[in-house]
Amino acid sequence: MKNISVRLYELAKMVDFTPIVADIGTDHGYIPYLLLKENKCMIAIATDISEPSLKKGKSLLESEFTPFQYDCRVGDGLEVLEPMEANAVIIAGMGGILISEVLEKSKEKAMSMDYLILQPMQAEEELMDYLTKEDYQLMEVRLVKENKKIYPIFKMKPGISEEIISWESFKEDPLFTELCQHKIHVFEEIEEQIQKNSADKKGIEEIQQEKRKWEGYLV
Ligand SMILES: C[S@@+](CC[C@H](N)C(=O)[O-])C[C@H]1O[C@@H](n2cnc3c(N)ncnc32)[C@H](O)[C@@H]1O
């Protein structure tokens, strides 16, 4: 099937066979499509806060699968799930802060999952800080490169962990250096824009601090 990104194919590979998987923020429905196509689950629950987005997902799923294999629901985060209904949850393609807010709003449901696959588009560190604070364990991480961008995908298990989840764990990944360089470049560009267009000294300091953090990972 065309249009499905490498990011989503790699994400689907991280799903072990799981009876019921919920994809939160499904949009075009590609994640449930891949999971059902590859027999990674029996039932996929596809959700989105936006009705028009969910419609796209629904039309893809109904063109390929029988109605008892999927369920489409409009709503906010995990609020559309019944307690203990899904065995695993996927939240991909959103910012890390939004993902942590979605998990925080439905803490008990999130903590009842066998595992969660989370793929932040930015603010990955803030998400990791949240997951560390909430005692999630890191099961697996993949850095996926597509169109010159690198996307981290985390597979997390709820429960007590002795480990602090940090970027140190991924330093062995060959794409890690590239990810850091990419982030440094992005912050340099933002800094340049601020320098040109405004005298917002506070904004510049924050950007420089972020940039130094990523530079620090390369040392
Ligand atoms: C950029 S798309 C990502 C689609 C797909 N998950 C992917 O990774 O390619 C983000 C989707 O998340 C949905 N979304 C945003 N906030 C949400 C929330 N709180 N609950 C459910 N869906 C949400 C948006 O409507 C949008 O369709």
Image (cartoon, grey):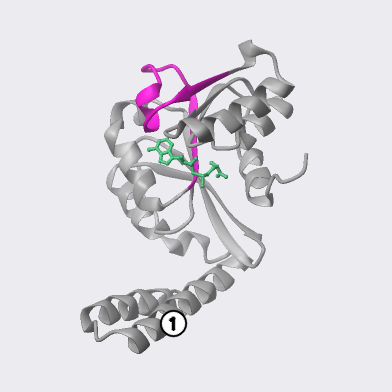
Q: Is residue 144 above or below residue 180?
A: above
Q: Which residue is nearer to you in this view: 55 or 124?
A: 55
The image quadrant of residue 212 is bottom left
Question: Mark 1: which amino acid?
Answer: Glu
Q: Which residue is mark 1?
A: 188
Q: Which residues make up the magenta segment? A: 71-93
Q: Can residue 23 be seen at all in this image of the molecule?
A: yes
Q: Is residue 211 above or below residue 108?
A: below
The image quadrant of residue 63 is top right
Q: Is residue 72 magenta?
A: yes
Q: Position of residue 78 (x, y in %)?
A: 38, 29
Which residue is at 34% across, 88% downward? 195
Q: Position of residue 116 (x, y in %)?
A: 47, 36
Outermost residue on the left side: it is 202
Q: Position of residue 35 (x, y in %)?
A: 66, 30
Which residue is at 72% across, 46% downward? 3
Q: Which residue is nearer to you in this view: 8 or 135?
A: 8
Q: Say whether residue 185 is left or right of residue 33.
A: left
Q: Is residue 86 magenta?
A: yes
Q: Position of residue 129 (x, y in %)?
A: 32, 54
Q: Which residue is nearer to you in this view: 182 or 200?
A: 200
Which residue is at 28% across, 34% downward? 105
Helix, strand or loop at label 1? It is helix
